Image (cartoon, helix red, strand yellow):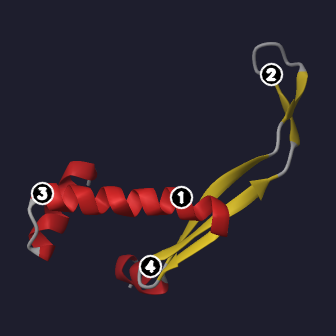
Amino acid sequence: MNKSEFIAAMAELSNMTKAEAERAFGAFRSTLESALPSSGKITLPGVGTFVVHERPARKGRNPATGAEITIAAKQTIRFKPAKNLVDRIHP
């Protein structure tokens, strides 16, 4: 399912127009983008948890030259689905 299919399904289930569903989805995404960096964790009951995860610096190799390089530390986002969501996929 892509974004437009998701928005169409959301509009149908919630009795909204597609434009209203698009705005609701945009507001949801904007809220995630602004709240996650400051809070570090967002839990949505029945959906799952978004967590900011620190990846430490590590050694790597340049595949073209074979030279050893240092890959910088960075922050990534991890998502852990809620148990009820996992149970629907793996009964």
Q: Earlier in the sequence, mark 2 or mark 4?
A: 2
Q: Earlier in the sequence, mark 3 or mark 2?
A: 3
Residue at 71 percent of width and 60 percent of height: 53
Q: CA distance from mark 2 to mark 4?
A: 38 Å
Q: Given the image, on which type of amino acid does mark 4 rest?
A: Val
Q: Earlier in the sequence, mark 4 or mark 1?
A: 1
Q: How many marks?
A: 4
Residue at 62 percent of width and 71 percent of height: 41
Decide if residue 70 is in sight here. Answer: yes
Badge 2: residue crowd in 10 Å (few <14, some 14–19, many ≥20): few
Q: CA distance from mark 3 to mark 2?
A: 47 Å
Vertically, is 74 above or below 84? above
Q: Quickly name the residue at label 2.
A: 62
Q: Earlier in the sequence, mark 3 or mark 4?
A: 3
Tag shown at residue 18: 3
Q: Earlier in the sequence, mark 2 or mark 1?
A: 1
